[in-house]
Image (tube, rainbow, N blue to C red):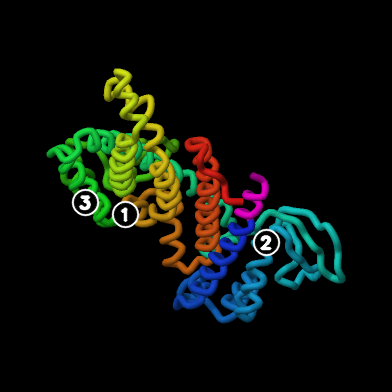
Amino acid sequence: MISYLLKKLGYALFTLWGVVTLVFFLFYLMPGDPAQMMLGENQTMEQVAAVQKKYGLDQTLGKQYLYFINDLSPVSFHSDNADDFTHWDDRYSGSSIVKLGGYHVVIKTPYLRESFQKTGKQVSEVIGDTLPNTIVLAIASILIALFIGLALGVISALYRDSWIDKVIQVISTMGMSIPSFFSAIIAAYLFGYLWHEYTGLPMSGSLYEMDDYGEGIHLQLRNLVLPALVLGIRPLAVITQLMRNSLLEVLSQEYITTAYAKGLTTLQVIKRHAFKNALNPVVTAVSGWFASLLAGAVFVEYIFGWNGLGKEIVDALNTKDLPVITGAVLVIASLFILINIAVDVIYIKLDPRVKLDT
Protein backbone atom coordinates (compact mmCIF):
# COMPACT_ATOMS: atom_id res chain seq x y z
CA MET A 1 0.00 0.00 0.00
CA ILE A 2 2.77 2.48 0.93
CA SER A 3 4.75 1.81 -2.24
CA TYR A 4 1.56 2.23 -4.26
CA LEU A 5 0.78 5.59 -2.64
CA LEU A 6 4.37 6.82 -3.17
CA LYS A 7 4.19 5.81 -6.81
CA LYS A 8 0.88 7.62 -7.21
CA LEU A 9 2.33 10.68 -5.46
CA GLY A 10 5.20 10.77 -7.95
CA TYR A 11 2.78 10.61 -10.88
CA ALA A 12 0.66 13.30 -9.22
CA LEU A 13 3.56 15.75 -8.86
CA PHE A 14 4.59 15.20 -12.47
CA THR A 15 1.00 15.74 -13.62
CA LEU A 16 0.62 18.93 -11.59
CA TRP A 17 3.89 20.28 -12.98
CA GLY A 18 2.63 19.59 -16.51
CA VAL A 19 -0.70 21.29 -15.82
CA VAL A 20 0.92 24.40 -14.34
CA THR A 21 3.44 24.62 -17.18
CA LEU A 22 0.74 24.31 -19.85
CA VAL A 23 -1.48 26.94 -18.22
CA PHE A 24 1.45 29.33 -17.76
CA PHE A 25 2.57 29.29 -21.39
CA LEU A 26 -0.97 29.29 -22.79
CA PHE A 27 -1.59 32.40 -20.72
CA TYR A 28 1.15 34.30 -22.56
CA LEU A 29 -0.43 33.42 -25.91
CA MET A 30 -3.52 35.38 -24.87
CA PRO A 31 -3.70 38.96 -26.17
CA GLY A 32 -3.41 41.91 -23.79
CA ASP A 33 -1.01 43.17 -21.12
CA PRO A 34 -2.05 42.22 -17.56
CA ALA A 35 -0.46 45.41 -16.19
CA GLN A 36 -2.49 47.63 -18.50
CA MET A 37 -5.67 45.68 -17.76
CA MET A 38 -5.09 46.19 -14.03
CA LEU A 39 -4.63 49.95 -14.36
CA GLY A 40 -7.43 50.70 -16.82
CA GLU A 41 -7.49 53.27 -19.62
CA ASN A 42 -5.79 56.24 -17.91
CA GLN A 43 -2.51 54.59 -16.96
CA THR A 44 0.91 56.18 -17.48
CA MET A 45 4.06 54.43 -18.64
CA GLU A 46 5.52 54.84 -15.15
CA GLN A 47 2.49 53.16 -13.56
CA VAL A 48 2.63 50.27 -16.03
CA ALA A 49 6.35 49.80 -15.35
CA ALA A 50 5.77 49.81 -11.59
CA VAL A 51 3.05 47.15 -11.82
CA GLN A 52 5.17 45.02 -14.14
CA LYS A 53 8.07 45.21 -11.67
CA LYS A 54 5.82 44.34 -8.72
CA TYR A 55 4.50 41.17 -10.36
CA GLY A 56 7.71 40.23 -12.17
CA LEU A 57 6.20 40.91 -15.59
CA ASP A 58 9.28 42.92 -16.61
CA GLN A 59 11.41 39.75 -16.64
CA THR A 60 11.99 37.44 -19.58
CA LEU A 61 9.45 34.67 -20.12
CA GLY A 62 11.95 32.04 -18.94
CA LYS A 63 12.66 33.88 -15.69
CA GLN A 64 8.96 34.47 -15.06
CA TYR A 65 8.35 30.74 -15.44
CA LEU A 66 11.17 29.84 -13.02
CA TYR A 67 9.94 32.41 -10.49
CA PHE A 68 6.44 30.99 -10.85
CA ILE A 69 7.55 27.39 -10.25
CA ASN A 70 9.72 28.60 -7.34
CA ASP A 71 6.68 30.17 -5.68
CA LEU A 72 4.56 27.03 -6.15
CA SER A 73 7.24 24.57 -5.04
CA PRO A 74 7.20 23.48 -1.37
CA VAL A 75 11.03 23.62 -1.47
CA SER A 76 12.21 26.91 -2.94
CA PHE A 77 15.07 29.42 -3.08
CA HIS A 78 14.76 32.99 -1.86
CA SER A 79 17.17 35.92 -1.97
CA ASP A 80 18.36 38.20 0.84
CA ASN A 81 18.22 41.11 -1.61
CA ALA A 82 15.06 43.16 -1.05
CA ASP A 83 15.09 44.28 -4.71
CA ASP A 84 15.07 40.69 -5.98
CA PHE A 85 11.66 39.29 -6.99
CA THR A 86 12.44 36.11 -5.00
CA HIS A 87 13.11 38.08 -1.80
CA TRP A 88 11.89 36.20 1.30
CA ASP A 89 9.18 38.24 3.04
CA ASP A 90 5.81 37.88 4.76
CA ARG A 91 4.12 36.75 1.53
CA TYR A 92 5.42 33.26 2.20
CA SER A 93 4.55 30.86 4.99
CA GLY A 94 7.46 28.59 5.84
CA SER A 95 10.97 28.46 7.30
CA SER A 96 14.54 28.56 6.05
CA ILE A 97 16.47 25.29 6.44
CA VAL A 98 19.88 26.32 5.06
CA LYS A 99 21.59 29.37 3.56
CA LEU A 100 23.64 29.11 0.36
CA GLY A 101 25.44 32.36 -0.44
CA GLY A 102 22.81 35.06 -0.70
CA TYR A 103 19.94 32.60 -0.94
CA HIS A 104 17.86 30.67 1.56
CA VAL A 105 16.61 27.15 0.89
CA VAL A 106 13.08 27.25 2.26
CA ILE A 107 10.36 24.73 3.08
CA LYS A 108 6.99 26.43 2.71
CA THR A 109 3.41 26.00 1.67
CA PRO A 110 2.88 26.66 -2.06
CA TYR A 111 2.45 30.37 -2.67
CA LEU A 112 -0.30 31.05 -5.25
CA ARG A 113 0.53 34.76 -5.39
CA GLU A 114 -1.76 37.78 -5.41
CA SER A 115 -4.64 38.27 -7.81
CA PHE A 116 -3.93 40.76 -10.61
CA GLN A 117 -7.45 42.18 -10.51
CA LYS A 118 -8.46 41.88 -6.85
CA THR A 119 -5.79 44.22 -5.53
CA GLY A 120 -4.20 43.05 -2.30
CA LYS A 121 -6.16 39.77 -2.20
CA GLN A 122 -4.26 36.51 -2.18
CA VAL A 123 -5.31 33.81 -4.64
CA SER A 124 -5.63 31.38 -1.71
CA GLU A 125 -8.30 33.72 -0.28
CA VAL A 126 -10.13 33.87 -3.62
CA ILE A 127 -10.15 30.08 -3.85
CA GLY A 128 -11.13 29.75 -0.19
CA ASP A 129 -14.14 32.01 -0.80
CA THR A 130 -15.38 30.20 -3.93
CA LEU A 131 -14.27 26.55 -3.77
CA PRO A 132 -16.71 25.57 -0.96
CA ASN A 133 -19.62 26.77 -3.13
CA THR A 134 -18.41 24.64 -6.04
CA ILE A 135 -17.97 21.60 -3.78
CA VAL A 136 -21.50 22.03 -2.41
CA LEU A 137 -22.83 22.25 -5.97
CA ALA A 138 -20.85 19.18 -7.09
CA ILE A 139 -21.94 17.10 -4.06
CA ALA A 140 -25.60 18.07 -4.56
CA SER A 141 -25.35 17.17 -8.25
CA ILE A 142 -23.71 13.79 -7.69
CA LEU A 143 -26.19 12.89 -4.92
CA ILE A 144 -29.09 13.67 -7.25
CA ALA A 145 -27.42 11.62 -9.98
CA LEU A 146 -26.73 8.72 -7.60
CA PHE A 147 -30.17 8.38 -6.02
CA ILE A 148 -32.12 8.81 -9.24
CA GLY A 149 -29.60 7.03 -11.48
CA LEU A 150 -29.28 3.92 -9.30
CA ALA A 151 -33.06 3.66 -8.95
CA LEU A 152 -33.62 4.03 -12.70
CA GLY A 153 -30.81 1.57 -13.44
CA VAL A 154 -32.34 -1.11 -11.18
CA ILE A 155 -35.83 -0.55 -12.61
CA SER A 156 -34.47 -0.68 -16.17
CA ALA A 157 -32.67 -3.96 -15.46
CA LEU A 158 -35.68 -5.57 -13.78
CA TYR A 159 -37.97 -4.62 -16.68
CA ARG A 160 -35.45 -5.41 -19.40
CA ASP A 161 -36.71 -4.87 -22.98
CA SER A 162 -40.08 -3.60 -21.76
CA TRP A 163 -41.49 -0.16 -22.63
CA ILE A 164 -40.30 1.07 -19.21
CA ASP A 165 -36.74 0.02 -20.04
CA LYS A 166 -36.92 1.67 -23.47
CA VAL A 167 -38.21 4.96 -22.06
CA ILE A 168 -35.43 5.05 -19.46
CA GLN A 169 -32.83 4.28 -22.13
CA VAL A 170 -34.07 7.11 -24.36
CA ILE A 171 -34.05 9.58 -21.46
CA SER A 172 -30.54 8.56 -20.34
CA THR A 173 -29.20 8.77 -23.91
CA MET A 174 -30.60 12.29 -24.24
CA GLY A 175 -29.08 13.20 -20.88
CA MET A 176 -25.61 12.14 -22.05
CA SER A 177 -25.99 13.96 -25.37
CA ILE A 178 -27.11 17.41 -24.23
CA PRO A 179 -24.24 19.78 -23.27
CA SER A 180 -24.48 21.23 -19.76
CA PHE A 181 -24.39 24.87 -20.93
CA PHE A 182 -27.35 24.26 -23.26
CA SER A 183 -29.47 22.50 -20.63
CA ALA A 184 -28.52 25.27 -18.17
CA ILE A 185 -29.88 27.96 -20.50
CA ILE A 186 -33.10 26.00 -21.12
CA ALA A 187 -33.61 25.25 -17.40
CA ALA A 188 -32.93 28.85 -16.37
CA TYR A 189 -35.42 30.17 -18.93
CA LEU A 190 -38.19 27.63 -18.27
CA PHE A 191 -38.04 27.13 -14.50
CA GLY A 192 -36.41 30.39 -13.44
CA TYR A 193 -38.24 32.81 -15.75
CA LEU A 194 -41.22 31.39 -17.66
CA TRP A 195 -42.58 29.23 -14.81
CA HIS A 196 -41.08 31.17 -11.92
CA GLU A 197 -44.55 31.91 -10.54
CA TYR A 198 -45.12 28.19 -9.99
CA THR A 199 -41.59 26.95 -9.18
CA GLY A 200 -40.41 29.87 -7.07
CA LEU A 201 -36.90 29.23 -8.39
CA PRO A 202 -34.62 32.13 -9.47
CA MET A 203 -32.74 32.33 -12.77
CA SER A 204 -29.52 33.14 -10.94
CA GLY A 205 -28.14 33.37 -7.45
CA SER A 206 -25.52 31.92 -5.12
CA LEU A 207 -25.57 29.85 -1.96
CA TYR A 208 -25.35 32.91 0.29
CA GLU A 209 -26.93 36.26 -0.54
CA MET A 210 -27.21 39.60 1.23
CA ASP A 211 -30.75 40.68 2.02
CA ASP A 212 -32.35 43.75 0.44
CA TYR A 213 -31.57 45.86 3.49
CA GLY A 214 -27.89 44.93 3.63
CA GLU A 215 -28.29 43.68 7.18
CA GLY A 216 -26.87 40.19 6.76
CA ILE A 217 -25.97 37.29 4.51
CA HIS A 218 -28.47 34.44 4.39
CA LEU A 219 -28.39 30.85 3.13
CA GLN A 220 -30.46 30.44 -0.04
CA LEU A 221 -30.84 26.71 -0.72
CA ARG A 222 -33.43 27.29 -3.46
CA ASN A 223 -30.65 28.84 -5.58
CA LEU A 224 -28.95 25.42 -5.50
CA VAL A 225 -31.82 23.49 -7.09
CA LEU A 226 -31.52 24.40 -10.78
CA PRO A 227 -27.70 24.38 -11.12
CA ALA A 228 -27.49 21.08 -9.19
CA LEU A 229 -30.14 19.44 -11.38
CA VAL A 230 -28.53 20.66 -14.59
CA LEU A 231 -25.02 19.66 -13.53
CA GLY A 232 -26.31 16.25 -12.43
CA ILE A 233 -28.06 15.35 -15.70
CA ARG A 234 -25.09 13.81 -17.50
CA PRO A 235 -23.71 11.76 -14.56
CA LEU A 236 -27.28 10.64 -13.83
CA ALA A 237 -27.58 9.30 -17.38
CA VAL A 238 -24.21 7.53 -17.17
CA ILE A 239 -24.98 5.98 -13.77
CA THR A 240 -28.36 4.74 -15.06
CA GLN A 241 -26.75 2.98 -18.01
CA LEU A 242 -23.88 1.54 -15.97
CA MET A 243 -26.13 0.28 -13.20
CA ARG A 244 -28.50 -1.37 -15.67
CA ASN A 245 -25.75 -3.17 -17.59
CA SER A 246 -23.79 -4.15 -14.49
CA LEU A 247 -26.87 -5.45 -12.69
CA LEU A 248 -27.93 -7.50 -15.72
CA GLU A 249 -24.47 -9.07 -15.80
CA VAL A 250 -24.57 -9.87 -12.08
CA LEU A 251 -28.09 -11.32 -12.31
CA SER A 252 -26.85 -13.79 -14.92
CA GLN A 253 -24.30 -15.31 -12.52
CA GLU A 254 -24.74 -18.81 -11.07
CA TYR A 255 -24.82 -17.69 -7.43
CA ILE A 256 -27.87 -15.55 -8.21
CA THR A 257 -29.60 -18.62 -9.62
CA THR A 258 -28.69 -20.43 -6.40
CA ALA A 259 -30.15 -17.59 -4.34
CA TYR A 260 -33.44 -17.85 -6.23
CA ALA A 261 -33.38 -21.62 -5.73
CA LYS A 262 -33.20 -21.05 -1.97
CA GLY A 263 -36.52 -19.24 -2.15
CA LEU A 264 -35.35 -15.63 -2.00
CA THR A 265 -37.56 -13.03 -3.65
CA THR A 266 -36.28 -10.70 -6.36
CA LEU A 267 -36.10 -7.83 -3.88
CA GLN A 268 -34.07 -9.95 -1.45
CA VAL A 269 -31.70 -11.10 -4.19
CA ILE A 270 -31.13 -7.51 -5.32
CA LYS A 271 -30.66 -6.23 -1.77
CA ARG A 272 -28.45 -9.04 -0.39
CA HIS A 273 -26.38 -10.10 -3.38
CA ALA A 274 -26.72 -8.29 -6.69
CA PHE A 275 -26.78 -4.60 -5.77
CA LYS A 276 -23.42 -4.41 -4.00
CA ASN A 277 -21.64 -6.49 -6.63
CA ALA A 278 -23.06 -4.32 -9.40
CA LEU A 279 -21.71 -1.12 -7.81
CA ASN A 280 -18.05 -1.44 -8.88
CA PRO A 281 -18.32 0.29 -12.28
CA VAL A 282 -20.67 2.86 -10.75
CA VAL A 283 -18.13 3.77 -8.05
CA THR A 284 -15.49 4.34 -10.73
CA ALA A 285 -17.88 6.50 -12.74
CA VAL A 286 -18.95 8.53 -9.72
CA SER A 287 -15.35 9.28 -8.77
CA GLY A 288 -14.53 10.45 -12.27
CA TRP A 289 -17.70 12.46 -12.58
CA PHE A 290 -17.34 14.10 -9.18
CA ALA A 291 -13.87 15.35 -10.10
CA SER A 292 -15.13 16.35 -13.54
CA LEU A 293 -18.04 18.26 -12.01
CA LEU A 294 -15.58 20.50 -10.19
CA ALA A 295 -14.13 21.47 -13.57
CA GLY A 296 -17.34 21.15 -15.59
CA ALA A 297 -19.22 23.51 -13.29
CA VAL A 298 -17.61 26.47 -15.10
CA PHE A 299 -20.42 27.11 -17.60
CA VAL A 300 -23.24 26.13 -15.25
CA GLU A 301 -21.96 28.45 -12.51
CA TYR A 302 -21.54 31.32 -14.96
CA ILE A 303 -25.03 30.94 -16.44
CA PHE A 304 -26.73 30.70 -13.04
CA GLY A 305 -24.51 33.35 -11.41
CA TRP A 306 -23.33 30.80 -8.84
CA ASN A 307 -20.39 32.27 -6.90
CA GLY A 308 -18.10 29.28 -7.29
CA LEU A 309 -14.62 28.51 -8.55
CA GLY A 310 -15.87 27.89 -12.09
CA LYS A 311 -17.35 31.38 -12.39
CA GLU A 312 -14.14 32.78 -10.90
CA ILE A 313 -12.10 31.04 -13.62
CA VAL A 314 -14.24 32.60 -16.37
CA ASP A 315 -13.86 36.06 -14.82
CA ALA A 316 -10.09 35.52 -14.50
CA LEU A 317 -9.83 34.48 -18.15
CA ASN A 318 -11.66 37.65 -19.20
CA THR A 319 -9.28 39.83 -17.18
CA LYS A 320 -6.11 37.76 -17.82
CA ASP A 321 -5.61 37.07 -14.12
CA LEU A 322 -2.90 34.36 -14.35
CA PRO A 323 -2.49 33.69 -10.59
CA VAL A 324 -6.21 32.99 -10.15
CA ILE A 325 -6.39 30.83 -13.28
CA THR A 326 -3.35 28.78 -12.30
CA GLY A 327 -4.34 28.47 -8.65
CA ALA A 328 -7.85 27.32 -9.55
CA VAL A 329 -6.65 24.79 -12.13
CA LEU A 330 -4.00 23.51 -9.71
CA VAL A 331 -6.58 22.97 -6.95
CA ILE A 332 -9.00 21.19 -9.30
CA ALA A 333 -6.20 18.96 -10.66
CA SER A 334 -5.08 18.12 -7.11
CA LEU A 335 -8.62 17.20 -6.08
CA PHE A 336 -9.00 15.07 -9.21
CA ILE A 337 -5.84 13.12 -8.36
CA LEU A 338 -6.76 12.67 -4.68
CA ILE A 339 -10.24 11.45 -5.57
CA ASN A 340 -8.85 8.89 -8.02
CA ILE A 341 -6.42 7.53 -5.41
CA ALA A 342 -9.21 7.34 -2.82
CA VAL A 343 -11.42 5.44 -5.25
CA ASP A 344 -8.69 2.87 -5.89
CA VAL A 345 -8.63 2.15 -2.16
CA ILE A 346 -12.45 2.04 -1.91
CA TYR A 347 -12.50 -0.37 -4.83
CA ILE A 348 -10.51 -2.87 -2.74
CA LYS A 349 -13.14 -2.68 0.00
CA LEU A 350 -15.96 -3.34 -2.46
CA ASP A 351 -14.19 -6.12 -4.33
CA PRO A 352 -11.34 -7.97 -2.50
CA ARG A 353 -10.41 -9.64 -5.82
CA VAL A 354 -9.01 -6.32 -7.04
CA LYS A 355 -5.36 -5.72 -6.12
CA LEU A 356 -3.49 -2.42 -6.07
CA ASP A 357 -0.90 -2.12 -8.82
CA THR A 358 2.34 -1.64 -6.91
Tag 3 secondary structure:
helix
Please tell me which residue lies in front, 259 or 167.
259
The disc, 2 or 1, on the residue closer to the chain's N-terminal end is 2
User: Which quadrant does the N terminus fall into?
Assistant: top right
Residue 301 screen position, x and y as percent: 37, 52
**Residue contact at pointers 2 and 1, CB within 8 angstroms:** no
Residue depicted at x 36% and y 40%: 212
Between label 3 and label 2, give the one nearer the viewer: 3
Identity, as a three-letter code, of the amino acid under mark 2:
Ser
Mark 1: few, some, or many residues within 10 Å (few <14, many ≥20)?
some
Identity, as a three-letter code, of the amino acid under mark 3:
Met
The numbered disc on residue 357 is: none
Mark 2: few, some, or many residues within 10 Å (few <14, many ≥20)?
some
Please tell me which residue lies in front, 134 or 199.
134
What residue sits right under mark 2 in the picture? 73
- 277 w.r.t. 59: above or below: above
Identity, as a three-letter code, of the amino acid under mark 1:
Ile
Tag 2 secondary structure:
loop
What residue sits right under mark 1 in the picture? 303
Would residue 178 be found to the left or right of residue 319 on screen?
A: left
The numbered disc on residue 174 is: 3
The disc, 3 or 2, on the residue closer to the chain's N-terminal end is 2
Residues in magenta?
Answer: 1-9
Query: Is most of the magenta stretch helix, strand or loop?
Result: helix
Mark 2 vs mark 1, CA separation in Å: 35 Å
Would residue 46 be found to the left or right of residue 329 on screen?
A: right
Please tell me which residue lies in front, 161 or 111.
161
Q: Is residue 168 visible?
A: yes
Mark 3 vs mark 2, CA separation in Å: 44 Å
Mark 3: few, some, or many residues within 10 Å (few <14, many ≥20)?
some
